[in-house]
Amino acid sequence: MVLGRWLGAALLLCFLSGLLSHLLQEPPDWLERYLPSRPANGYRITQGLHVIAGIAAIPLLGAKLWTVYPKLFEWPPVRSVAHALERLGIAVLVAATLLELFTGLLNTLQWYPWPFPFRQTHFWLGWTAVGGLLLHIAVKAPQIGANWWRSQAAVPGRRAFLASVTVATAAVTVTTAGQSVPWLRWSDLLAPRRPDIGSLGLPVNRTAAQAGTTVVPADWRLTVAGPRPYQLSLAELQALPQHTARLPIACVEGWSASAEWTGVRIRDLLDRAGAPSDALVRVVSLEAEGPYAVTELPAPYARDGLTLLALMVNGQPLNADHGYPARLIAPNRPGVLQTKWVSRLEVQ
Ligand SMILES: Nc1nc2c(c(=O)[nH]1)N[C@H]1C(S)=C(S)[C@@H](COP(=O)(O)O)O[C@H]1N2
Ligand SMILES: [Mo]
């Protein structure tokens, strides 16, 4: 049935884009130095697609379950071992997919009402759901093949049902996709964030008050720890050659927004410390604790001319919420890793 095809396509798109996002955010050690820092908008697009496809899958899944739920009560419940296995497979598939979409949706709302770590759970549920989906497609292959080109029997009400599913899916997509797609901003009515609303033209995910970094010590210095370590005050950083790059903040929660960042190239700072060109860099924030107080910057990002220690955004000095006195901004990098309130760069 046509619903299954659309749902399957949305789930597979979700899975593949999610896998890319996961690898960019948490690469295994061996992959780190091969991560591409281009295209600059890459993560913005894959994570945007991930959230769009996931939201579209919700009404599609609801409709699919609506059309098949009478089978839940079929009699006898089990006809053979093969039939029992098939039903078990479907139970796992449905449970994993429901939980996966539910945790993902709550994540876009920045709501984590559960005791388990979101990312790992979402990652493994994703594998479970896709494993179940592929198994389901394999088991049903003969039927899917036989029905692919055949026009459906004229069941009364079928067209109206499909039309309402299409309208519902289009509606949730169009009213939320504007959080990452600039030309759909006008219709961004239901997404939790408007990417163009916020101080200096940009939303704020975690404020300085939430991170406990409202008071920056008067003697703040950037420390660059490497073979030739040194420190610079804000005035000294401002006196170095400044570069400007237009780069997005693309939050894993689904919103993204481009801004014009101005500051010092990370690679210039590293060269001055005598860092080898393939070195991994740890970026340390003033933030005392928090999952993103320290991040790793693999060499391809550190060497990219677009990667900046930004001091300004959209032509104005950073404010506290956007990371004053200095923040990291790099191309093709998840928003969570664009460290704010930077105090140290450590060459590893
Ligand atoms: N030190 C630190 N940096 C951080 C965060 C944080 O919690 N602590 N949040 C990150 C997240 S999740 C995002 S999406 C971006 C948002 O940047 P903005 O608030 O300037 O838009 O900052 C990132 N940098
Ligand atoms: Mo984020």
Image: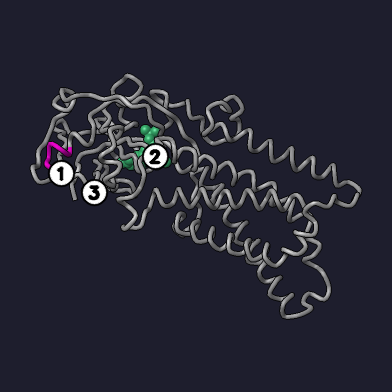
User: Quick one: which residue is furthest to the bottom in this view?
Assistant: 81
Amino acid type, label 3: Leu
Q: Mark 3 = which residue?
A: 280
Q: CA distance from mark 1 to mark 2?
A: 23 Å
Q: Disc 2 marks which amino acid?
A: Asn
Residue 167 inside the magenta-drawn segment: no
* Residue name at image x 52 percent, y 34 percent: 180
| Sequence-wise first label, 3 or 2 | 3
Categorize mark 1 by other alpha carbons within 10 Å: few (<14), some (14-19), many (20+): many
Residue at the image position 13 percent from the left and 26 percent from the top = 236
Q: Quadrant of residue 38?
A: top left
Mark 2 is surrounded, within 10 Å at the Cα level, by few (under 14), some (14 to 19) or many (20 or more) other residues, namely many
SS at badge 3: loop
Q: Are marks 3 and 2 in contact (CB under 8 Å)?
A: no
What residue is shown at x 59% (from left), y 57% (from top)?
A: 99
Q: Earlier in the sequence, mark 1 or mark 3?
A: 1
Location of mark 2 (residue)? 332
Give me the residue at 56% from left, 47% from top. Answer: 105
Q: Is residue 206 visible?
A: no
Q: The residue under label 1 is which amino acid type? A: Ala
Residue that carries the numbered disc 1 in the rendered image: 275
In the image, residue 304 sits, relative to residue 154, either above or below, namely above
Magenta range is 270-276
In whole angstroms, how far apart are the C-alphas of marks 1 and 3?
A: 9 Å
* Residue 8 spot, x, y in % from top left: 66, 53
